[in-house]
Amino acid sequence: MVIGSPHVSSRRRNAAALVAALTLTTVAVAVTVTAAAPAADAAITGATLVNKLASRCLNVPGSTDGTRLTIADCNGSASQKFTSTAASEIQVTVGGAVKCLDANGGGTANGTAIIVWPCHGGADQKFTLTAANAISNTKSGRCLDVYGSATAAGTQVVLWDCKNGGNGSQTWTPNATPPPPPPPSGIAKAAPYLFMGWGNPPSPATVQSQTGVKWFTMAFILAQNGCNPAWDGQRPLTGGVDQTAINQIRAGGGDVIPSVSGYQGNKLGPACGTADALAGAYQKVVDAYGLKAIDIDIENSDEFESEAVQDRILNALKILKQRKPGITTILTFGTLNTGPNYWGTRLITQSKAIGAGIDIFTIMPFDFGGGANMYQSTVNAAEGLKATLKTAYGWSDATAYTHMGISGMNGLSDQQELTSESTWTQIRDWAAARHLARFTYWAVNRDRGCAGGGVQSSCSGIAQSDWAFTRITAGYNG
């Protein structure tokens, strides 16, 4: 159903961790181990060591002697690059000095912290990488383990009885492809969609002052005269009503995430013939506003259901990341009520294969073809997304959630699915409990009541107060 714009049909279609403060006490235990020193392990040569369970890297968070090792988001720094020697030491350079992994105080008990210390050749500094990618300490016979099988960044690494693989907390893969880090904390997780060319657009300053929301996702960047970005494919990239709205939003202490494409219109993905040209179009948008993030809303048969255009978009985002290393990239796409369909699964799988470095994968959980219980349908769809991300990237549950987003639809969807204020609050609280990286909805333009009015561009089709869904969204604290 088209509700007021030749470019948008409501825009869419179907298409724990242990984080407690940790005090580890070294217990002195007399142990005598007689073993020949193993040869250097060539697999650890300036290598990152990615933990299988946490999908995070072995990390030295400081440079002083005695600094305890942790797991952390992989960042490629020297403090995450390790080399084994002919003496079976594992060395790392921190603070400009080469140091060795060491069992704290020469300890051998379960829970002994792993630290960095000047290399001295003792058995407490000798480690072997096993065929199962466990790291065994020669003196104790115990393995490097993420304490409590936790997955949170900052969790300490200790000695523990070797589990022969176990649940992955003792599995350290050299030079595995690390996951991208979580989106920067400077990017707001709650940013509802606002469209200045459709649906009687409200003043963003008014919405900010009455709801507490600060950021908005601005729709839509389309193609104009070939591979040139323009608002809705018609309005200038700068100097028009969209820039006026962005200036208001920033004056109110917020910022924007422009959304590229959407359901209808002449899109940049097909219009730009190469990934490099498409990256150039994206970069024009980023540079025009000094952006921190960009959302690619990939829908319909011309983009979402096209292998060539999917790959072009992913490669373009990879190029954009190389040119603008600080940019957060978001993919938004439709879903079944069980999770991504074939095209969504392909998009995720290809993003990993291409190395696109996508930060957030956002599903649009509505227009399922019927969904009486929109809370449960949304949860099921999100859990399906999590499972797909885990399969593609090898992430833990916790890591997958931090790369996920939900973009719902307030009131009535195109297919008459009802998301009430109470349902949206339930969905928000479910997402917050799992620390999803993005929580948004379509659209602020529709965040006004019109009970019995059906699906419209300027109201939700249900009885509600103005900006009710925006207030709920503003309360997202994931």
Image (cartoon, rainbow, N blue to C red):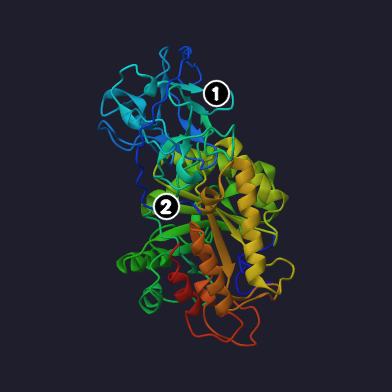
Q: Are marks 1 and 2 in contact (CB under 8 Å)?
A: no
In this view, 194 is above or below 131 = below
Question: Residue 173: image x %, image y %?
Answer: 53, 30
Residue displayed at 59% across by 48% down = 269
Horizontal arrangement in the rendering, residue 104 relative to residue 74 (left or right):
left
Is residue 400 among the parts visible in the rendering? Answer: yes
Q: Position of residue 352 (x, y in %)?
A: 58, 39
Query: Disc 1 marks which amino acid?
Result: Thr
Q: In which quarter of the image is residue 262?
A: bottom right
The answer to whether 44 is drawn above or below residue 283 in the figure is above
Where residue 157 appears, as percent x and y from the top left, is: 42, 38
Q: Mark 2 points at which residue?
A: 19
- Quarter of the picture holding the C terminus: bottom left
Residue 245 occupies quadrant: bottom left
Q: Which of the pair 64/371 is nearer the observer?
A: 64
Q: Residues within 10 Å of mark 2 (few under 14, many from 20)?
A: few
Disc 1 to disc 2, C-alpha distance: 29 Å
Of label 1 and label 2, which has the lower sequence position? 2
Q: Residue furthest right?
A: 369
> Residue 419: x percent and y percent?
61, 75
Q: Name the residue under label 1.
A: 130
Q: Nearer the viewer, residue 308 or 359?
A: 359
257 sits to left or right of 122: right
